[in-house]
Image (spheres, helix red, strand yellow):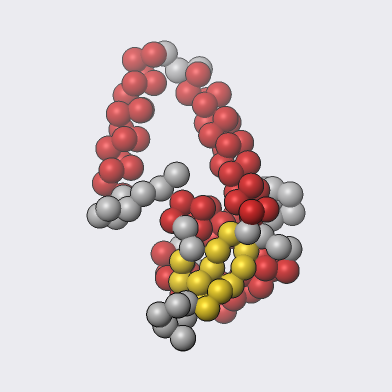
Amino acid sequence: MDDQRCEGVGYEQMRVMQALRCGGPAIMREVGAILAITPRNMTAIVDSLQETGLVVRRPHPGDRRATLLELTPAGDKLAGAALAGQLARMGKIFDELPPGQQQEFYDALIRLTEAMRPAGGECC
């Protein structure tokens, strides 16, 4: 999967960026836990994203031990472009299906999305 890079950003890095794009600024260890990334690997991923100006670390206002991650404007733009490209490719696949099957998939995706969404959570 690392061969599929978007402007030099690898798969694991893009997963972190997409999580931040969907959920907004978040505590680094929580993002790692949600994505099943070890703390050591999470640190390396965030270091590389920070070096390229895609993510910033900020002190958590209520917990001195925690670090908040936030996308920079460049990171948000790149994550949005990557998501748009993925959605366009998926759309082409669905365009080949008959309308009845498209509706079945759509209905199933809505149910899955609702089942996976945390209480009160939103995603882009």
Q: Is residue 116 above or below residue 48?
A: above
Res. 103 image quadrant? top left
Residue 63 is situated, as x and y percent measured from the top left of the image, at 42, 82
Res. 17 image quadrant? bottom right
> Which residue ends up furthest to the front in the rendered image?
61
Residue shown at 57% from the left, 30% from the top: 88
Residue shown at 59% from the left, 55% from the top: 14
> Which residue ends up furthest to the bottom in the rendered image?
65
> How many numbered circles does the render carry?
0
Q: Is residue 2 above or below residue 39?
A: above
Residue 33 is situated, as x and y percent measured from the top left of the image, at 42, 70
Residue 6 is situated, as x and y percent measured from the top left of the image, at 69, 48
Residue shown at 32% from the left, 53% from the top: 121
Q: Quadrant of the C terminus?
A: top left
Q: Is residue 41 visible?
A: no
Q: Is residue 114 visible?
A: yes
Relative placement, left or right, of 117 versus 44 is left
Relative placement, left or right, of 52 versus 105 is right
Q: Nearer the viewer, residue 54 or 92?
A: 54
Residue 114 is situated, as x and y percent measured from the top left of the image, at 28, 43
Relative placement, left or right, of 69 versus 50 is left
Residue shown at 36% from the left, 49% from the top: 122
Q: Is residue 94 above or below residue 15?
A: above
Q: Is residue 84 above or below residue 75?
A: above
Q: Nearer the viewer, residue 2 or 106?
A: 106
Q: Nearer the viewer, residue 73 or 106?
A: 73
